[in-house]
Image (tube, rainbow, N blue to C red):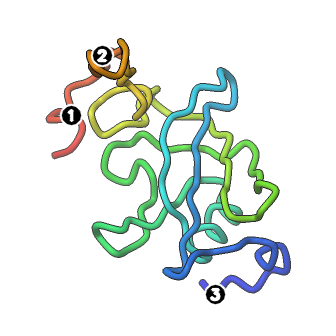
Amino acid sequence: MTPDSTWLAAVTFDENGLIPAIAQDADTGTILMVAWMNAESLAETVATGRAVYWSRSRQRLWRKGEESGHVQQLRELRLDCDGDVLLLKVKQEGGIACHTGRESCFFRRLDGDSAQATWTITEPVLKDPELIYK
């Protein structure tokens, strides 16, 4: 797919052709995850209504849920004021967005002052990742 839509011209990709994409639960407002998109993944997301990201580790398109079944259905897409960050408001299928089996990738909270600060796990594992990724 070669993206050629004029709406894409407003998007500012970095020197690697990527833009950060924040996935937020459309109903609860919970921030689920942050990933990267390129022009192709963004165009496919808009065309299909299903979140598609660029996997930097695999160097290929990553259709969210392709292995886990935890698909993200796009409800709304927003572009920030500088045109260099995307916000995807999604319906998260299965209630799990994180590869750790949690609802959100943001499950650690910093507690305490700087000298005694520690990370506290705030979200439970909803499903063992070993059962999700086979």
Reading the image, the residue beneath label 3 is 2
In the rendered structure, are the residues bearing label 3 and label 1 in contact, judged by CB atoms less than 8 Å apart?
no
Label 1: how many Cα within 10 Å (few below 14, some 14–19, many 20+): some
Mark closest to the chain's N terminus, 3 or 1:
3
Query: At which x and y percent is residue 107?
Result: 38, 24
Question: Looking at the image, which residue is at 61% across and 44% down?
Answer: 73
Reading the image, the residue beneath label 1 is 129
* Numbered disc 2: secondary structure: strand
Label 3: how many Cα within 10 Å (few below 14, some 14–19, many 20+): few
Check the picture and name the quadrant holding the N terminus: bottom right
* Numbered disc 3: secondary structure: loop
Residue type, numbered disc 1: Pro
Horizontal relation, residue 117 to residue 85: left or right: left
Query: At which x and y percent is residue 130?
Result: 14, 35
Mark closest to the chain's N terminus, 3 or 2:
3
Residue type, numbered disc 3: Thr
Q: Is residue 66 above or below residue 32?
A: below
Q: Is residue 117 above or below residue 73?
A: above
Mark closest to the chain's N terminus, 1 or 2:
2
Horizontal relation, residue 64 to residue 116: left or right: right
Numbered circle sitting on residue 120: 2
Residue type, numbered disc 2: Thr
